[in-house]
Image: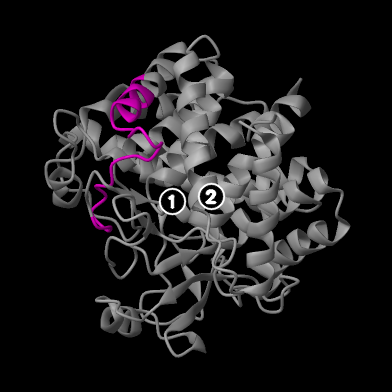
Amino acid sequence: MMKAQLKTAVEKNIRWFECSGIMRPSDGFWGVAERIAVMELNEAEKKINDMFPCQTRLNAGTVVLDHRRADCALESALMFDLASEYFGRNDYRKIATNLIQFLLNRSCLQVTDPDSEFFNLWKWATPLFFDANKIWIDDNSWIVICLLILAQRGHEGLHETALSTADALQKQMQLYFDFIEQKGRNAKYNTAIFGVQLNPHWIGLATLALAFADKTRKTRNSYNLIRRYYDIVLDGPHAWDLDSLCKSASGVSWAISEFAYLSFVAPLVAQICGDERIMRVAEKAADILLKNQMSDGHFTSNHFEAPAGDHLADLIYTQNWATLGLYHLAKLSPAKVEYRAAFEKSAQFLIDIQDSSGTSLFDGCWRGMYDCDVGAWGGGNRFEGGKGSIYSGWTNAVISIAFLLELTDSTLSSWLLTDAE
């Protein structure tokens, strides 16, 4: 793979962040929106309008869904921070700092009431419309992961916030695992926190946050919880989790998107914990991914919130995480040369389909879905997935982060491990 192509792709993607309207002002002072939504011929338009009323219209057929999410802000901040180092651009570092400071000082998303069961966790979005005050496991996990990386990269005053959120996550995970130990893994767990489920997207991501927190503190406080998760994750969803069950890939326990997440979190957790059994879980996830990678580099789409099909590339729940995961597996299991080849195929696919429309709204972005039969963005829409959803954090920042890690020969654990050693 030509590193010049990766460099150009990241440069184009950063210009999209700055020019599209997803981040206004473009210095990140007021954060970054969750996504741009293309409404023209979008079958999910009514539900999008009903569910996400905080909007700015960019043109007759396109709006910014202008609510601010902590995970999107910090994934974008990490992208700009890595880009600042690689390109030698101090202005990118300033954008990263602004995004962080927006979240900490101007978003009011963290629960600060010590009497709340959610103390030190973070709400989903601001402004607080409808369900924006929900607490999600994956969002809070990303907050811990990104803040700890950014802290180790020289941003001051982040450790305490990150570790307090990690402690709150650990408390919730302890309650959950104690429950299923008593009642069984298929008993319905009632909690006001969303995403307390066995999916790699949910609790899998939390294990990485807890592992990062342990490494930062030089403890193993969460190790037993982490091990309990990886002992059972390959068994698949809860019996009551119909969304995950109906999308489980033929002959395997999870949807392909979940194996994409697992290929990302498990090798890093295995590395930090020094646990070869967890690395074997990571490799099993990757082997399933490889069986579902098409000749052009894309992976089967079958997430329940996105259109499904072998010819569709889902860039919100699958391709992005698989690329990041296979990159880390190639670094941490170098003897498995097939992982490096699969990463390169996926990265090349993403380079090839990056938007080249020449319009400031879209040029340089990756949209939510690509129809490989047609050779264009397509495949349909859902209110959170599909071709019309162009995410800041989940899709664009994550892909650029994967490319920047490759360009700098780094992993997401590099800064924590360097400090620990």
Q: x%, y% of residue 1?
A: 61, 31
In depth, the one of 19 and 351 nearer the eye is 351
Q: x%, y% of residue 189?
A: 22, 48
Q: Residues within 10 Å of mark 2 (few under 14, many from 20)?
A: many
Judged from this view, the residue extending furthest toward the top is 335
Above or below, 121 relative to 87? below
Residue found 48% across the figure and 55% down from its top:
139
How far apart marks 1 and 2 lie (CA) works out to 6 Å
The residue tagged with tag 2: helix, strand or loop?
A: helix
Q: x%, y% of residue 383?
A: 30, 70
In depth, the one of 245 and 211 nearer the eye is 245
What range is drawn magenta here?
A: 284-307
Q: Which residue is mark 1?
A: 138
Q: Which mark is residue 142?
A: 2
In this rendering, would 326 be left or right of 76? left
Asked whether disc 1 touches disc 2, contact meaning CB atoms under 8 Å apart, the reply is yes
Tally the numbered discs. Answer: 2
Residue found 54% across the figure and 67% down from its top:
357
The residue tagged with tag 1: helix, strand or loop?
A: helix
Judged from this view, the residue extending furthest toward the front is 374
Please say whether residue 293 is one of the residues in the magenta stretch: yes
Q: x%, y% of residue 225?
A: 41, 30
Residue found 75% across the figure and 49% down from its top:
83
Q: How is the image coloured?
A: one colour
**What type is the residue that disc 2 sits on?**
Trp
